């Protein structure tokens, strides 16, 4: 049995995912100028798989490819729109879906002026939640260059676990790179979600949950 039916339903009319400061939504051609602003920045693309955009035509081609995926219900990539300004400041989504549709790999990019503000952590949490709760995924992976500290800190903050370092595992921009491989399993996500939900309920009731929180952390094997 595969996960194809659940995936097809989840990717049909890919929904918007609102967070506290962001709106994750489909890319449109009207986003081209915003996307080009960060995709043309070598500081952003230095650690990514794709080349720096040299002209707005590169950006339009990229967005066009995303529109094709949306049209065929195969697209799981969201624009990251900053609610305060309406500006698109990045993208996030599933680059790969395989193993019967149960395993996905997530990737992301963010404009430099918005680094170190917790925005990508906020976006990734929403995308992980959608992947497990609506796409039927059992395992979600993410990779980054071994020296991309900012990227793997985001993964760790979202509960992803380092599976290991893959030496010379990816050929990018004319050279082999070693990468860090992180993953999160649905059963671990659900356990963490339930624990967090219980803590929130106790906090709302004014109860002292300090001793229970320690017990939960210990039971989680940390």
Image (spheres, rainbow, N blue to C red):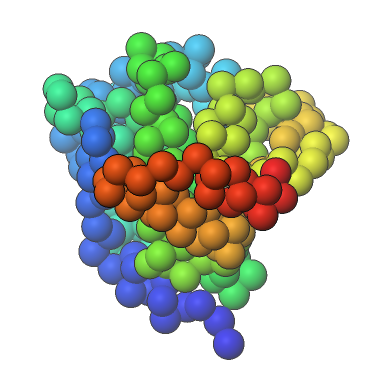
Q: Is residue 70 above or below residue 33?
A: below
Name the foreground residue: 159 vs 70: 159
Give the residue at x 70% y 20%.
147
Residue 176, position in %: x, y? Answer: 78, 30
Q: In which quarter of the image is residue 75?
A: bottom left
Which quadrant is the N terminus positioned in? bottom right
Give the residue at x 28% y 59%.
14
Q: In which quarter of the image is residue 91?
A: top left
60 on left or right of 131: left
Which quadrant is the C terminus positioned in? top right
182 on left or right of 207: right
Give the residue at x 66% y 54%.
219
Q: Quadrant of residue 166?
A: top right
Q: Is residue 63 visible?
A: no
Q: Can residue 109 be seen in this view?
A: yes
Q: Is residue 30 above or below residue 96?
A: above
């Amino acid at each position: 049995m595969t996960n194809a039916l659940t995936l097809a339903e989840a990717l049909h009319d890919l929904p918007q995912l609102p967070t506290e400061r962001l709106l994750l939504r489909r890319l449109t051609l009207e986003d081209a100028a915003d996307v080009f602003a960060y995709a043309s920045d070598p500081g952003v693309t230095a650690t990514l798989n794709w080349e720096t955009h040299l002209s707005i035509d590169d950006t339009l081609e990229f967005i066009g490819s995303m529109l094709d995926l949306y049209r065929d219900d195969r697209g799981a990539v969201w624009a990251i729109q900053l609610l305060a300004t309406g500006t698109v400041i990045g993208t996030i989504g599933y680059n790969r879906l395989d193993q019967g549709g149960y395993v996905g790999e997530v990737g992301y990019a963010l404009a430099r002026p918005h680094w170190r503000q917790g925005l990508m952590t906020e976006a990734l949490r929403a995308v992980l939640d959608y992947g497990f709760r609506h796409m039927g995924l059992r395992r979600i992976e993410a990779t980054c260059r071994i020296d991309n500290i900012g990227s793997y800190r985001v993964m760790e903050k979202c509960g992803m676990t380092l599976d290991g370092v893959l030496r010379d595992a990816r050929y990018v921009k004319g050279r082999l790179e070693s990468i860090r491989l992180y993953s999160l399993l649905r059963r671990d996500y659900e356990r963490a979600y339930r624990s967090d939900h219980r803590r929130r309920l106790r906090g709302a009731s004014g109860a002292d949950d300090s001793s229970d929180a320690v017990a939960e952390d210990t039971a989680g094997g940390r």
